[in-house]
Image (tube, grey):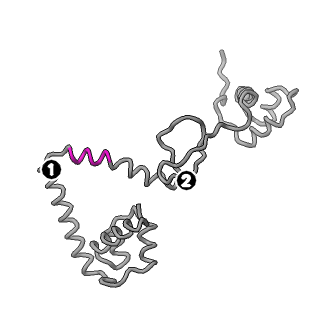
């Protein structure tokens, strides 16, 4: 059986609309020639559109992160039911449980060593940011808050250098913003 090249090529929305609007008396081959598409692709698309229609099934639910209404493609239960904007934060929340279990499975000595390295890193960067901090002991402005809120994934040492603050100052202010529920 000869294989027609290009049968699995996707049709554009304009092609699909032309197939929907085409006269039923026009054959699939003629329509494929008009659209410059493979005959098998047009035949399959026509058959699918006759059976299922132009639209795709949707379901209405709520986002599992922010609980606002969400329209999703298809039916049934899915794990990833999030708005595109909510997905990065939702994935971080979902991974926390696995991270906690992995941490608790480590031997006590390994945990102690890792915490010591983190503390050494923080102390080193705290001293470095103390030397360059221009805004040390100054009030946090709304513009500073906006930077911290907009760039939640940026490492604290980078933000401290850009804002002219110390590392521990950025850590403390992030915690205050989390308490006010302005940060995830």
Q: In this view, does 67 lie above or below 183?
A: above
Sequence-wise first label, 2 or 1: 2
Q: Confirm whether the magenta stretch covers residue 151.
A: no
- Picture quarter with the N terminus: top right
The answer to whether 126 appears left or right of 11 in the picture is: left
Would you call the spot at circle 2 few (<14 residues within 10 Å), some (14-19), or many (20 or more)?
few
Residue located 55% across and 34% down the image: 76
What numbered label is drawn on residue 50? none
The secondary structure type at the circle numbered 2 is: loop
Q: Which picture quadrant has residue 45?
A: top right
Say whether residue 16 is visible: yes
The answer to whether 21 appears left or right of 94 in the picture is: right
Q: Name the residue under label 2.
A: 68
Would you call the spot at circle 1 few (<14 residues within 10 Å), some (14-19), or many (20 or more)?
few
Magenta span: 97-104
Measuring from the top left, give residue 90's x and y in whole percent: 43, 51
Q: Is residue 52 above or below residue 140?
A: above
Say whether residue 134 is visible: no
The secondary structure type at the circle numbered 1 is: helix
Q: Is residue 93 above or below residue 177?
A: above
Q: Confirm whether the magenta stretch covers residue 101.
A: yes
The answer to whether 112 appears left or right of 76 in the picture is: left
- Picture quarter with the C terminus: bottom left
Give 9 or 19, whichever is nearer the viewer.
19
Q: Residue furthest top?
A: 1
Measuring from the top left, give residue 6's x and y in whole percent: 66, 31
Q: Mark 1 points at which residue?
A: 110
Helix, strand or loop: magenta stretch: helix
Give 105 or 130, whichever is nearer the viewer.
105
Measuring from the top left, give residue 142's x and y in whole percent: 45, 78
Residue located 20% across and 43% down the image: 105
């Amino acid at each position: 059986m000869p294989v027609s090249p290009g049968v699995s090529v996707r049709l554009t929305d304009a092609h699909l609309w032309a197939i929907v609007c085409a006269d039923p008396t026009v054959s699939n081959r003629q329509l494929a020639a008009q659209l410059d598409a493979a005959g098998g692709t047009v035949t399959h698309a026509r058959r699918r559109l006759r059976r299922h229609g132009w639209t795709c099934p949707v379901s209405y639910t709520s986002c599992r992160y922010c609980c606002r209404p969400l329209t999703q493609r298809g039916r049934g239960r899915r794990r990833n039911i999030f708005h595109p904007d909510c997905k990065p934060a939702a994935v971080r929340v979902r991974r926390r449980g696995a991270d906690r279990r992995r941490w608790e499975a480590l031997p006590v000595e390994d945990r102690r060593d890792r915490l010591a390295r983190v503390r050494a890193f923080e102390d080193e960067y705290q001293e470095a940011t103390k030397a360059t901090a221009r805004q040390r002991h100054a009030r946090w402005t709304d513009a500073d808050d906006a930077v911290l809120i907009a760039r939640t994934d940026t490492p604290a040492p980078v933000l401290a250098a850009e804002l002219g603050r110390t590392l521990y100052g950025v850590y403390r202010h992030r915690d205050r913003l989390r308490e006010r529920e302005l940060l995830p």
